[in-house]
Image: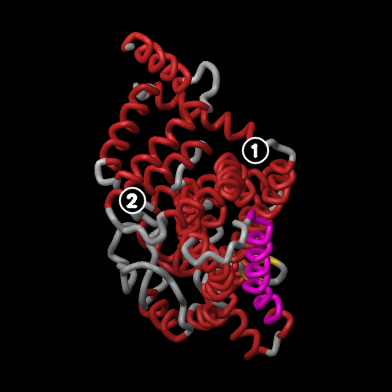
Amino acid sequence: MSDIILTAYDGAILGPIAKILGWIMNGIYNITYNLFGFENIALSIILLTFVIYMCLFPITYKQQKFSMLSQKMQPELQKIQKKYKDKKDQASMMAMQSETQAVYQKYGISPMGSCVFMLINFPILLALYRVFYNVPAYITNVKAQFTSLVEGIISTPNAADILDKITTETNVMTYGSNSVIDFSADHATISNSLVDILYAFNPSSWDMLRESIPALTDIINTTQENLNHINNFIGLNISNTPWYIIKTSFESHTYLLLILALLIPVISYLTQVLNIKLMPQAPSTGDNSDAMANQMKMMNRIMPLFSLFFCFTVPVGLGLYWIVSALIRSIQQFCLNKHFQKIDLNVMIEKNQEKAKKKREKLGITENMINNAARMNTKKVTSNMSYAEKERALEKASQLRSQAKPGSMAEKANRVKEFNERNSR
């Protein structure tokens, strides 16, 4: 008997996340049972998905704002890239980096803004994978369904050999590192190990268990019926993978279940495509130099295909989460698109600049320090310039000073310059 899970996943990073998600899911399961007398893991997964994405909404909002501002500043970034396209010297690279950073500062966003949502969502997805594969370790009422059967198996002679034969011959798929149950261990460890294995049983496994331990037939039937009820989603067992359901349904000629199982990956793919279609896309310029935009387009093609193939090999419960999450994101995206269409981006840019200024002031970074640093960088860059390039740079700086807004630092600097020039005459 291979690969046994021993209760909740205890990984250093995903383990705590899985426990938090499991705790929330357990609360949702208990609420639906206590209020409505309804026990169903699929419903708990749907409600858990809703809770997760409501909690992530502030990050979703910021990501949407980043996308909208990125579209607006994209022409400026492309202009800078074209300007320095064939210049590989250090001075040009420094100037390009400085001008690019100035554009991001102008719009008040970070270049890493688009990565935050992925960095948060991906660990949640992996942790949910652990939870859905071993639901009894996280939902107490589900684990309680096995109590009578576990006690009966423990008291059965040669139980270890019986379980070893069943899991081997019926290809029970489980996770973990132990190859056998240690029946010399404490009672709690043995019970948890048995629950993990029994939850992974398929119909053939249950039939073989009845044949192997006839005295427990009634308890086995009751346990299996209860599990089928709480694991049921439109006729599918959410603990099984669509691929397993497709194979067994084809063998037993239950083609309706086969079609339903096939729909899980297909709908997952379609909802991912819908979500991507609703996301704001950078305008197409035909400029191959914009490598980041090209990579994002490639990812938008690959991710739906990834979800299509991935959902064949994971429990139906995880595929259900993927579908529901894509639908919720699509609804959020649609509403946010309507919201941002009514917002003046110029006003948003000014607010972002003001927020960035306040953050710098909290860190003790004043505008004078920024200007001094800019002047130092200018000196470093201009030291490698030709005479003509210096003249053009000075002319441009003079034009910018003449266009300074009243009350700005540049306008004050102009006054000081004029005062010094008058006194030097």
Image vertical order of residue 120 relative to residue 269, above or below: above
Q: Position of residue 217 (x, y in %)?
A: 57, 74
Looking at the picture, which amino acid does disc 2 mark? Ser
The answer to whether residue 94 shows anywhere in this view is: yes
Mark 1 Cα-neighbour bin, 10 Å: few <14, some 14–19, many ≥20: some
Looking at the picture, which amino acid does disc 1 mark? Leu
Residue ID at (36%, 72%): 3
- Indicate the quadrant containing the C terminus: top left, top right, bottom left or bottom right: top left
Q: Position of residue 265 (x, y in %)?
A: 62, 73
Q: State the residue position of label 2.
A: 92
Q: In this rendering, would 314 be left or right of 283? A: left
Q: CA distance from mark 2 to mark 1?
A: 31 Å
Quarter of the image holding residue 253?
bottom right
Q: Nearer the viewer, residue 192 or 75?
A: 75
Whether tag 2 and tag 1 are in contact, CB under 8 A, the answer is no
SS at badge 2: helix
Q: Which residues are magenta?
A: 258-280
Residue ID at (49%, 78%): 213
Q: State the residue position of label 1.
A: 345
Residue ID at (48%, 32%): 399
As for residue 401 lying within the magenta part, the answer is no
SS at badge 1: helix
Q: Nearer the viewer, mark 2 or mark 1?
A: 2
Residue ID at (54%, 70%): 302
Q: In this rendering, would 24 be left or right of 391? A: right
Image vertical order of residue 265 relative to residue 340, above or below: below
